[in-house]
Image (cartoon, helix red, strand yellow):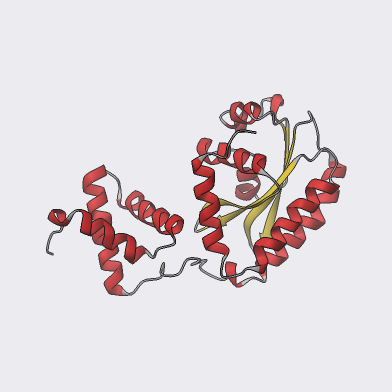
Amino acid sequence: MHELPEEAVERLARVTKLLKTQRSLPARLETVVEIVRRTVPNCDSAGIMLMVEGRPTTAAVSDRLAVEIDLVQYRSGQGPCLAAIEDSHVVSIDVLDGDSRFTHFAPGALDLDLESVLSLPLPVGNSVVGALNLYSRTPNGFDSRSEEVALPLAAYAAEMIATSPLYAYSLDMVEGLTESRESQAIVAQAAGIIMAIEARTENEALDQLREVALVSGKSMRAVADSVIAEHPMRIENP
């Protein structure tokens, strides 16, 4: 398989930063996906996708294929794993069947020789925090038996997440994302600069700052300070 794309490397770096406060959890999730890959017939690859601050993030994979398939979903904005999380139910598809929900996902999946996907939601309380995803290069690779084997492992993964401080309450998973009022003002100022330079909305600007913080491991305040330092002439007094 070709080299892992830069976007995938960045996402994995982000996950490493997010998970470092609970070191046992990543290893346990990796164990789950490896067990799934080994025990479910026709499962060539497996992964766990988690919602982090409202965004899907690949948290554990058995191999590169799982990362690349997830990237297809992130880029297209659709896919069985995203649907399992959004709709809170198991999604099983054969890519060649041409499911109308996944018309933008299918071409990228087929480019990776993916034929079948089985996604099981991970419920925690009244919310779904992610999905356990199985990928196969075999047409119609998954059936009711596959789901029966995978369900207990999905439940185990959900329980691990539910009992981890990592997913407590607001999911502020990076040091420094919860800022003082002074820092909030600086972040807002940096967002304003991005809005002016790149013609973005406020939410888009804040999302950009947050993504840089997540990938770099810096606080939102530190990222905002950098933006302001780079564009001092754009600072306006209230």
Q: Position of residue 171 (x, y in %)?
A: 52, 66
Residue 124: quarter of image: bottom right
What residue appears at the point 21 percent right and 59 percent down from the top-left corner? Answer: 229
Answer with left or right where residue 214 lies relative to residue 163.
left
Answer with left or right where residue 231 lies relative to residue 215.
left
Q: Position of residue 214 (x, y in %)?
A: 45, 58
Question: Up-down: is 137 above or below 84?
Answer: above
What residue appears at the point 79 percent right and 46 percent down from the top-left corner? Answer: 37
Q: Position of residue 34 (x, y in %)?
A: 76, 51
What residue appears at the point 66 percent right and 29 percent down from the top-left corner? Answer: 99
Q: Position of residue 222 (x, y in %)?
A: 33, 64
Residue lying furthest right = 145
Q: Quadrant of the C terminus?
A: bottom left
Between 229 and 79, the one nearer to me in the picture: 229
Between 21 and 155, the one nearer to me in the picture: 21
What residue appears at the point 64 percent right and 70 percent down from the top-left corner? Answer: 164
